[in-house]
């Protein structure tokens, strides 16, 4: 007999894997000898009450053996004389598109504007220490995309879009910790991601695919409403059966190129705000109801959402035990984001707190047409740059001072390496953002007593949570509505929001292309 059962154990009991069989037999009221096999399927933490429990979901076989495992590893290999497909961008959507094409015997040609992951680290060091922004190699552009130097969160609500488990299994096959297959909120960690991304690159190359770095696409080759290839900044042409456009939400020049070529794009709602930082010890104490964290529990995180003046305000990309990083992709910008290593051991917790931005908020930018949202983002990034002193120093303010509309005379320590400067963010941000954030912070303080504190620091601006542009495509085929053989995918296309959903989107496009050709 096969059964699924959930155990609710103390952190100490959950740490005793050798006793799982005893716990299962107790709850099932059977002799331990009757349990022929058991497998942990899912692990989560229930910290709603002081008596914190670890929830473990098991598959158990009683008086019968489990069926033999029949799953086979995915075989990647381009066939001889394989049809070529161009993949623009080597972020999660682009990498999984390339792997999906190889799975079907196609030959992906991946063009990435940034550098490979090891060289990218050098440019990030220059950005953090010397405030030098390389517009082609930064926290957003380069091998692995923006996800490479992030927390590597793999939690998604997009399970209806595709096989989340398969996406996670591919990560594990390339070096990720197998725990991501069972954790309710899995993550990879910034320190682990570069190796995983390099392993994916090696799989693509060894299977017959091609990857070219520092190749920025500057033109599309279009004939009779069909895309037949692309041109890079050196004038080199790449021809293929189809083009998967997986450029991410910060590749603003791609939107401009699409528009200049008469290829339809459209505006959509997005979100903007600030990044907030608390002492991690405080978040642990709030979430675990005790001033000292049990070492058997993970570093505490949070997820917050509320309505303020008919708009959603919510936490985004929460990084427990993490640091805040500069994510500008060009001159005269200050953009902040978060990241954390696998062990989440930093003494700081940070999260984006963002407000939904709708078309009616962009009336002052209507002269920019479909690019009104981009102009809005760019203006706030420029104001943050000026307020920080025209470097990558970020404007900052204590949370309660922001709510009370007071200049912060002093600032707490921060994880943000380029440094911070006290600035009146309540005046720099548009009223539509600042007033909603002020209300939301107080609401969050009621939901999480202790969250609303002068120890909390806000930095501006968090502007790249999502794209204000969508590249319209057919719901079923994922092909652009007007240009044949063009498949826009991932965050840059406006159809995903994170590593897993982007990976699913890219993989789905590869399978549809393979089926067609």
Image (spheres, helix red, strand yellow):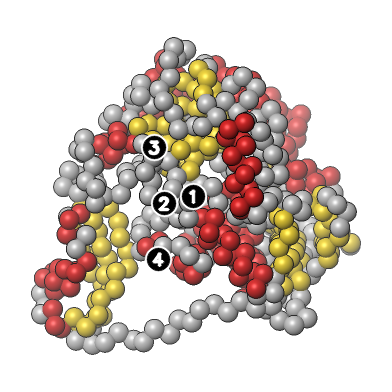
Does dot 3 land on a helix, a strand or a loop? strand
Name the residue that disc number 4 marks.
Answer: 178
Question: On the picture, is 10 further left or further right than 184?
Answer: left
Does dot 1 land on a helix, a strand or a loop? loop
Q: Distance between the residues labelled 1 and 2?
A: 7 Å
Q: Residue at point 71% right, 44% down?
A: 136
Of the numbered discs in the image, which one, if any, rests on residue 349? 3
The image position of residue 300, as x and y in percent, is 32, 43
Q: Earlier in the sequence, mark 3 or mark 4?
A: 4
The residue lying toward the viewer, choosing from 228 and 16, is 16
**Quick check: 320 above or below 157?**
above
Image quadrant of residue 473? bottom right
Name the residue that disc number 2 marks.
Answer: 342
Image marks 1 and 2: residues in contact by CB distance under 8 Å: yes
Image marks 2 and 4: residues in contact by CB distance under 8 Å: no
Name the residue that disc number 1 marks.
Answer: 190
Does dot 2 land on a helix, a strand or a loop? loop
Image marks 3 and 4: residues in contact by CB distance under 8 Å: no
């Amino acid at each position: 007999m096969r059964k699924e059962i959930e155990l609710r154990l103390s952190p100490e009991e959950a740490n005793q894997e050798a006793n799982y069989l005893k716990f299962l037999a107790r709850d099932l009221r059977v002799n331990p000898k009757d349990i022929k096999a058991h497998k942990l399927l899912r692990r989560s933490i229930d910290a709603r009450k002081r008596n914190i429990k670890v929830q473990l979901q098991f598959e158990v076989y009683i008086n019968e053996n489990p069926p033999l495992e029949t799953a086979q590893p995915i075989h990647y290999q381009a066939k001889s004389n394989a049809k070529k497909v161009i993949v623009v961008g080597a972020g999660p959507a682009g990498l999984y598109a390339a792997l999906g094409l190889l799975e079907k015997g196609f030959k992906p040609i991946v063009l990435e504007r940034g550098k490979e992951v090891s060289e990218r680290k050098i440019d990030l060091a220059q950005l953090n220490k010397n405030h030098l922004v390389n517009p082609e190699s930064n926290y957003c552009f380069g091998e692995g995309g923006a996800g490479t130097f992030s927390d590597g969160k793999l939690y998604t609500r997009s399970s209806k879009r595709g096989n989340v488990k398969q996406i996670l299994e591919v990560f594990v096959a390339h070096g990720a910790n197998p725990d991501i297959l069972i954790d309710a909120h899995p993550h990879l960690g910034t320190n682990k991601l570069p190796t995983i991304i390099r392993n994916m690159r090696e799989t693509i190359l060894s299977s017959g695919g091609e990857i070219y770095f520092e190749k920025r696409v500057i033109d599309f080759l279009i004939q009779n409403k069909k895309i037949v290839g692309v041109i890079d900044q050196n004038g080199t042409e790449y021809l293929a059966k189809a083009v998967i456009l997986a450029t991410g939400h910060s590749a603003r020049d791609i939107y401009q190129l699409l528009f200049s070529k008469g290829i339809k794009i459209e505006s959509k709602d997005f979100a903007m705000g600030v990044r907030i930082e608390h002492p991690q010890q405080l978040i642990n104490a709030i979430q675990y109801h005790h001033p000292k964290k049990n070492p058997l529990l993970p570093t505490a995180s949070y997820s917050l959402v509320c309505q303020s003046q008919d708009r959603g305000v919510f936490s985004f990309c929460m990084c427990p035990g993490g640091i805040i990083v500069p994510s500008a992709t060009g001159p005269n910008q200050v953009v902040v984001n978060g990241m954390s290593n696998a062990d989440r051991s930093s003494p700081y917790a940070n999260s984006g707190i963002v407000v939904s931005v709708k078309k009616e908020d962009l009336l002052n930018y209507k002269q920019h047409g479909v690019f009104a949202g981009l102009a809005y983002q760019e203006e706030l990034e420029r104001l943050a740059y000026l307020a920080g002193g025209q470097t990558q120093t970020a404007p900052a303010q204590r949370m309660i001072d922001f709510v009370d509309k007071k200049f912060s005379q002093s600032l707490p320590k921060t994880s943000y390496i380029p440094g911070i400067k006290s600035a009146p963010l309540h005046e720099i941000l548009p009223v539509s953002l600042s007033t909603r954030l002020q209300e939301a912070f107080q609401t969050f303080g009621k939901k999480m007593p202790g969250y609303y504190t002068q120890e909390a620091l806000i930095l501006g601006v968090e502007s790249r949570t999502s794209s204000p542009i969508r590249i319209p495509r057919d719901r079923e085929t994922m092909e652009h509505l007007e240009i044949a053989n063009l498949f826009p995918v991932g965050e840059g296309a406006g159809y995903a929001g994170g590593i897993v959903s982007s990976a699913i989107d890219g993989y789905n496009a590869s399978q549809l292309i393979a089926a067609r050709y």
